[in-house]
Image (tube, grey):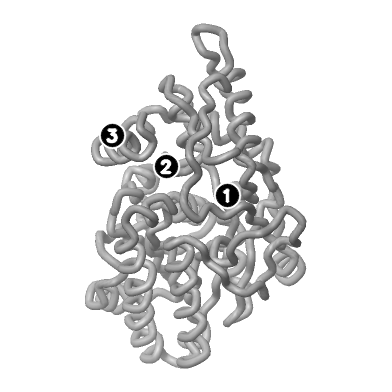
Amino acid sequence: MTILVSGGCGFIGSNFIIDWLSREKEKIINLDNLTYAGNINNLSSVKDNDDYVFIHGDIGDKSTVSKILETYNPRAVINFAAESHVDRSIYGPEPFIKTNIVGTFHFLEAIRSYWENLAEINKNNFRFLHISTDEVYGSLSSEAPPFKETNPYEPNSIYSASKAASDHLVRAYHHTYRLPTLTSNCSNNYGPYQFPEKLIPLVIYNALSGKQLPIYGDGKNIRDWLFVSDHCSAIRLILNAGKVGETYNIGGLNEKTNLEVVQTLCSILDELQPRDDGFSYATQISFITDRAGHDRRYAIDATKIQEELGWQPIQSFETGIYQTVKWYIKNSDWVQNITSGAYQDWIKKRYAV
């Protein structure tokens, strides 16, 4: 038995592969184009595992995808592949359209062709699980109830609009062609191997490097934080027990303002790796001009996945964030390797540091 994972060298994908191989005796084929956020070293711990195969390629390359499908005959496909950094979508939207919309279309076409030619029993058991985001729902006011799966899509950034389009394509392929699809929309993930453009790894990296800790606007934008291992457990459950054609929201049940997150990180760093001068890392906090189209609040109602599939997160924000900081301190070589070259130039340009 085999599953195909696309975008498995990214943050969530690599955590999923490591978690899967520690639990299951089933081969994973990892198709990844190794763009800026894809790091093959994320999976160095499993590279010699007989159940793991890495293939460098693009989900938008239909011939490559078709060849992989014909060679390995997967029973399921999990699509993590996406351009996912909102800031980059503002300053360079084209890759988001190319990968998230056009790439998803070509990927679905190759998968549909493969699925339609499967034997009937394999056809009935096949699943395509599309990993998406809560950002497709738009922005919530402070008093509004959390996003349900029935909320209308109201994306406000190029990134979220491109993900919304990919979600619609997946839905359409199910309803038009009966392709057995599933979609999950998750809240903000955090944990090991996250590319240091995202808030939590960026703050840890900048704090330990003696740089400013940039916070957009007034720091009161609210996100629901989901530890990546909890997300992985939800994905496994949806793949194995989710109802075909359905969408499942996955939330951490931990709403925090960006300022609260940064202050928590500073407090943990003060404990685990204090500054030489005795001052708190919080003195490095700097408020910068808010980004364009910055959504005020995201929050996930995870009732559906809890009631239908029995899932709930294990980690609280306090336990998850503490583990995360410890991981980044312990894995400083990984951080150093990824925060160099083009990435470093982009950060300097964007944040003027």
In whole angstroms, how far apart are the C-alphas of marks 1 and 2?
A: 20 Å
Among numbered discs 3 and 1, the one appearing first in the sequence: 1
Coordinates of residue 127 in the picture (x, y in percent): 50, 77
Compared with 296, 106 (above or below) is: below
The dot on residue 131 is: none
Instruction: Give the percent coordinates (x, y) of residue 292.
Output: 47, 52
Determine the image quadrant of residue 281: top right
Q: Residue type at mark 1?
A: Ser
- Mark toward the viewer: 1 or 2: 2
Q: Is residue 72 left or right of residue 204?
A: left
- Tag 1 secondary structure: helix
Q: Locate residue 338: give its quadrant.
A: top left
* Circles 3, 2 touching at the beta carbon (< 8 Å): no
Q: Dot 3 lies on which element?
A: loop
Q: CA distance from mark 3 to mark 1?
A: 27 Å
| Residue at image mark 2 | 197
- Relative side of 148 to 106, left or right: right
Alpha-carbon span between mark 3 and mark 2: 12 Å
Q: Position of residue 299 (x, y in %)?
A: 67, 56
Whether residues under marks 1 and 2 lie with C-beta atoms below 8 angstroms apart, the answer is no
Looking at the picture, tell me which residue is in the foreground, 343 or 18: 343
- Can residue 48 be seen from the camera position used here? no
Q: Position of residue 296 (x, y in %)?
A: 61, 52
**Amino acid type shown at disc 2:** Glu
In the image, 235 versus 38, the foreground residue is 38
Where does label 1 land, which residue?
A: 229
Q: Which residue is most to the top?
A: 277
Residue to which mark 3 is pinned: 340
Q: Of callouts 1 and 2, which one flags the residue occurring earlier in the amino acid sequence?
A: 2
Name the amino acid type tagged 3: Ser
> Which residue is rendered at x = 31% and y = 38% of the image?
349
